[in-house]
Image (cartoon, rainbow, N blue to C red):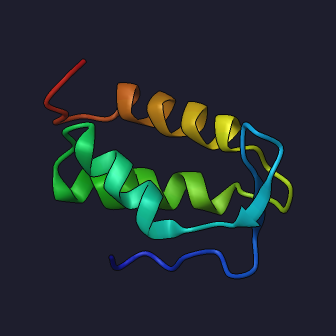
Amino acid sequence: MTTPTPNGIEIVKASGEKENFDGDKLHASIERAGAESGIIEKVYGAVTRTMRPGVSSETILGRTFHRLQTAENILWK
């Protein structure tokens, strides 16, 4: 992964549990969605740049898939 991961960002999971953001999980989710490597980095960067402490995992997921739907060269649309 070439894009920096936000350090010390605490997110809130759907269960209400709080945990530190794990950039590898987001990166893997984007990859599993079928995005090509260049798109993965662009989407990852766009989503993580807007993250603030306390953001919900649901919000992160929504932002990620919105970016994927508008990105070019995706294997699914």
From the viewer's side, name the closer residue of 54 and 37: 54
Q: Quadrant of residue 69?
A: top left
Q: Position of residue 31 (x, y in %)?
A: 25, 50
Q: Which residue is drawn at 69% across and 37% down?
A: 59
Indicate the quadrant containing the N terminus: top left, top right, bottom left or bottom right.
bottom left
Quarter of the figure with residue 20:
bottom right
Locate the C terminus and report the quarter of the image it occupies: top left
Q: Which residue is drawn at 42% across and 68% down?
A: 24
Query: Which of the two residues, 55 or 4, is positioned nearer the viewer here?
Result: 55
- Judged left or right of residue 35, residue 13 is right
Judge by depth and name the residue closer to the eye, 64 or 42.
64
- The location of residue 57, given as percent across then percent down, is 67, 44
Drawn side of residue 64 relative to residue 50, left or right: left
Residue positioned 27% across, 37% down in the render: 33
Position of 9 relative to 54 (above/below)? below
Q: Which residue lies furthest to the top in this view?
A: 77
Q: Is residue 12 above or below residue 25?
A: above
Position above or below: 7 against 61? below
Q: Which residue is drawn at 34% across and 61% down?
A: 41
